[in-house]
Image (spheres, rainbow, N blue to C red):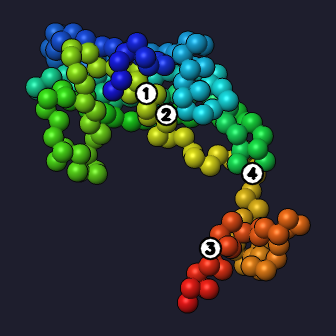
Amino acid sequence: MADHESLEFSRPILVRSLRSSQSGAPREVSIEANEIERNAMARRLGLPAIASFSCRYRLSAEARGRVLAEATLTTRLTQICVVTLEPFEDALVERFAVRFVPETDMREDDLSDVDSIDETPYAGDNIDIGEAATEQLGLILDPYPRRPGVEIPAEWRGDEGGAVKSDERENDGSTRRPFAALEQLKRRQK
């Protein structure tokens, strides 16, 4: 993770403060991004705007400086529809878990189990739950967002009802199918 001062939404937590909690019970922490942080996050993630962003964590100290963070992220944001190119409002709620692990304890084989909880290395005495929430938002965003109710045009899907012949061209000579030129190149190589 980057330096806390350079992050858009940084909320460091001192790891030893989690170990000193009563009877090892998990610590509940809620964080919320202010307007400046939301604007910076939107720029980082390529979004027009983020109207609200909060995350509720349940932090449990584990052995050897590890911290299990179970969280629920809630956000209202604006995305651009890939079909109409118009902005639209969206609301997301996502549950996730991440295990913070001291940098010195991270090993390559820790990263190999796909079904295990994501592990995030940290240096020093702090974990950054704000950056973890920002990274999670980046992971859950649809790379091809569509406004609710907007269908993908049949010619984009290439299904039977909307199949476009490879010789069907636009006025500028380009094909309407994005991979038609690649198909023609493959045929020529045979």
Disc 4, SS: loop
Tell me if 150 is positioned left or right of 112 in this view.
Answer: right
Disc 3, SS: helix
Disc 2, SS: helix
Looking at the rendered image, the quarter that the C terminus falls into is bottom right
Report the label total. Answer: 4
**Reading the chain from its start, which is encountered first: label 3 or label 4?**
4
The mark closer to the camera, 2 or 3, is: 3
**Reading the chain from its start, which is encountered first: label 1 or label 4?**
4
Residue sitting nearer the eye, 23 or 16: 16
Query: Can you tell which quarter of the image residue 39 is in?
Result: top right
Disc 1, SS: helix
Query: Can you tell which quarter of the image residue 72 is in?
Result: top left
Looking at the rendered image, the quarter that the N terminus falls into is top left
Residue farthest to the front, as pictured? 189
Residue contact at pointers 2 and 3, CB within 8 angstroms: no
Position above or below: 81 against 78: below
The residue at 74%/56% (across/down) is 151
Position above or below: 6 against 154: above
Q: Which residue is mark 4?
A: 83
Query: Which label belongs to residue 133?
Result: 1
**Tag 4: residue type?**
Val
The mark closer to the camera, 1 or 3, is: 3
Q: Which residue is mark 2?
A: 137
Residue sitting nearer the eye, 70 or 184: 184
Residue contact at pointers 2 and 1, CB within 8 angstroms: yes
Can residue 152 be seen from the camera position used here?
yes
The residue at 23%/51% (across/down) is 113
Instruction: Give coordinates of residue 62: x percent, y percent.
Output: 16, 26
Calculate the distance from the C-alpha at mark 2 to the C-alpha at mark 1.
6 Å
Q: Which residue is mark 3?
A: 182
